[in-house]
Image (cartoon, helix red, strand yellow):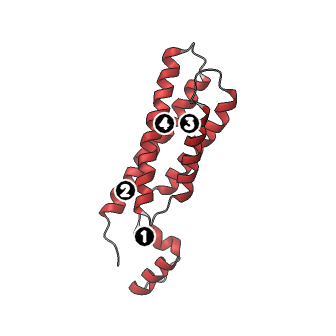
Amino acid sequence: MAEFERINDEYGLDESPSETKKRLLPHYHGDIVRYLFLTSAILLILNLPVSKGPSLPLPLAIICMVILVISAGFTNRLKKAVVATDFIISVVGFFIAETYSVHIYKTTPFDGKDFFTYLAISVLLFFATYFSIRSIVRLFSAKSPS
């Protein structure tokens, strides 16, 4: 909050912090990435207890959920490293989810539920990758107002 007040004072602006954020970072998509991460974690949580086929090993699934939730919580438009980390997490998560989706499809009698759950997670993380890279391009190419 102090950063936006400093910018408002320095440039003689009279805006709320949210207006300043939107004006300074119009192509920041971290909020979308946050929701995509949380939705992916929720799908994992809902699928694990009822999964009948091969799924992520339980410790790995729990670690993935925790990483997604922590990353969603830390997502911040002013921290370039966090936005870059969101990109890395979305790429790795997409790779893991899509790998399991293909593995389930090829190795088990088609049940559908597990396959479509991991496929949905991989699609969500694919979009998270896209929106993360859009934010990275904007944040790393934007000129700082200070």
Apparent side of residue 107 relative to residue 114 in the rendered image (left or right): left
* Numbered disc 3: secondary structure: helix
Q: Amino acid at mark 4?
A: Val
* Numbered disc 4: secondary structure: helix
Q: Which residue is mark 2?
A: 136
* Numbered disc 2: secondary structure: helix
Q: Amino acid at mark 2?
A: Ile
Q: From what the image shows, is residue 77 above or below residue 88?
A: below
Residue at 50% over, 27% down: 100
Q: From what the image shows, is residue 51 above or below residue 124?
A: above
Q: Quadrant of residue 145?
A: bottom left
Residue 28 in view of the camera: no
Q: Which residue is mark 4?
A: 123
Q: Which mark is residue 23?
A: 1
Q: Nearer the viewer, mark 3 or mark 1?
A: 3
Q: From what the image shows, is residue 15 above or below residue 110?
A: below
- Image quarter where the C terminus lies is bottom left
Along the polypeptide, which appears first: circle 1 or circle 2? 1
Q: Which residue is mark 3?
A: 60
Q: Amino acid at mark 1?
A: Arg
